[in-house]
Image (cartoon, grey):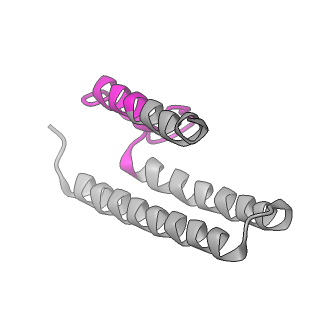
Amino acid sequence: MDIIKLTIMPIIVALIATAIFMKIYKNKEKVDHGFAFNYFKLSYRRKMIRTLYSFLVLMVAFVILYAASPLRFRYLLFLLLFSVIGFIIQFLYNYKMWKQEQNTPPV
């Protein structure tokens, strides 16, 4: 029961929150300059920039986790590779959508 409480339930809550925010900000004006706390309120260019900042934070977190964690190295390496692949996919998607948005004339 603990594994369900600690892993599956937070994932379900995060997916539900993501779906709600995607629905709320679907056709709203996006922020391209300045600060916006909500990720879904950002333009694709700003999402790409935030992805780069998040990647740096992730690397620092992995160094701290490696130094302080009782987990084996191969588990940490698997987690790192999984995270890096996810960040690369997210970055490339946001870059592609930013360029596509740039080439689309305003309505």
In the rendered view, tell whether residue 46 sits above or below residue 79: above
Magenta run includes residue 42: yes
Q: Residue at x 43, y 62 (%)?
A: 91
The span picked out in magenta is 16-44
Image location (x, y in percent) of residue 12: 42, 34
Quick one: which residue is furthest to the front in this view? 1
Magenta run includes residue 49: no
Nearer to us in this view, 18 or 28: 18
Q: Please give left or right for residue 55 compared with residue 19 in the image.
A: right
Image location (x, y in percent) of residue 5: 56, 33
Nearer to us in this view, 25 or 104: 25
Q: Residue at x 56, y 32 (%)?
A: 37
Image location (x, y in percent) of residue 34: 55, 37
Q: Please give left or right for residue 47 compared with residue 3 in the image.
A: left
Q: Residue at x 53, y 63 (%)?
A: 83
Quadrant in which the N terminus is drawn: top right
Nearer to us in this view, 85 or 29: 85
Image location (x, y in percent) of residue 75: 63, 69
